[in-house]
């Protein structure tokens, strides 16, 4: 059994919920879909282009994930793009396993889970990551 198959089995047994750990200030996750690795806020939203397109972002929109192993702050960094615009990153506490799966060519995808218009910056846009 290779690492990718092992990770898939762990995720299948756990339902991926161990990746979806949340802090007290985070909105509770909705029930994840089968194959979900978790629902999480986009980190660093205030530093990127999300504000330019946020009036067009809606739940269910496909997001593109891009590994950034050369990122000087986090070698496991995974950028989140929507409509061709970088809107931030998968939170650092969630990205090690997701990055490993992406590096092993797993089909990891993301969709917009919801937009929390009451939040100013962090926690405004949430994505669901799936395998």
Image (spheres, rainbow, N blue to C red):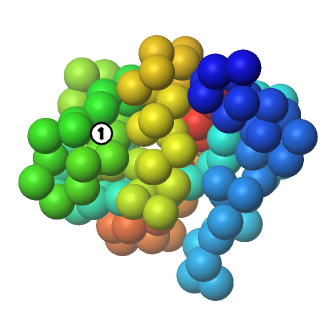
Residue 6: image x %, image y %?
A: 71, 30
Q: Which of 127 and 92 is in front in this view?
A: 92
Q: Is residue 54 visible in the rendered structure shown here?
A: yes
- Is 109 rendered above or below residue 128? above
Residue at 89 percent across and 40 percent down: it is 13
Residue 92: image x %, image y %?
A: 39, 60
In this image, 106 relative to 64: left or right?
A: right
In this image, 28 relative to 3: left or right?
A: right
Residue 73: image x %, image y %?
A: 16, 59
Residue at 55 percent across and 16 percent down: it is 107
Q: In which quarter of the image is the C terminus?
A: top right
In this image, 9 relative to 94: left or right?
A: right
Residue 108: image x %, image y %?
A: 54, 24
Q: In which quarter of the image is the N terminus?
A: top right
Q: Which of 20 and 125 is in front in this view?
A: 20
In this image, 24 relative to 86: left or right?
A: right
Q: Nearer the viewer, residue 26 or 92?
A: 92
Give the farthest residue toward the right: 13
């Amino acid at each position: 059994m290779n690492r990718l198959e092992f990770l898939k089995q762990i995720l299948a047994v756990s339902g991926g919920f161990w990746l979806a750990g949340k802090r007290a200030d985070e909105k509770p996750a909705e029930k994840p879909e089968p194959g979900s690795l978790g629902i999480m806020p986009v980190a660093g939203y205030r530093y990127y282009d999300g504000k330019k397109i946020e009036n067009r972002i809606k739940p269910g929109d496909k997001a593109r994930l891009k590994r950034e192993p050369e990122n000087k702050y986090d070698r496991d960094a995974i950028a989140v793009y929507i409509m061709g615009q970088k809107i931030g990153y998968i939170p650092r506490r969630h990205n090690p396993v997701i990055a490993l799966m992406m590096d092993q060519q797993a089909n990891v995808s993301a969709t917009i889970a919801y937009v929390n218009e009451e939040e100013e910056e962090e926690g405004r846009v949430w994505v669901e990551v799936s395998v």
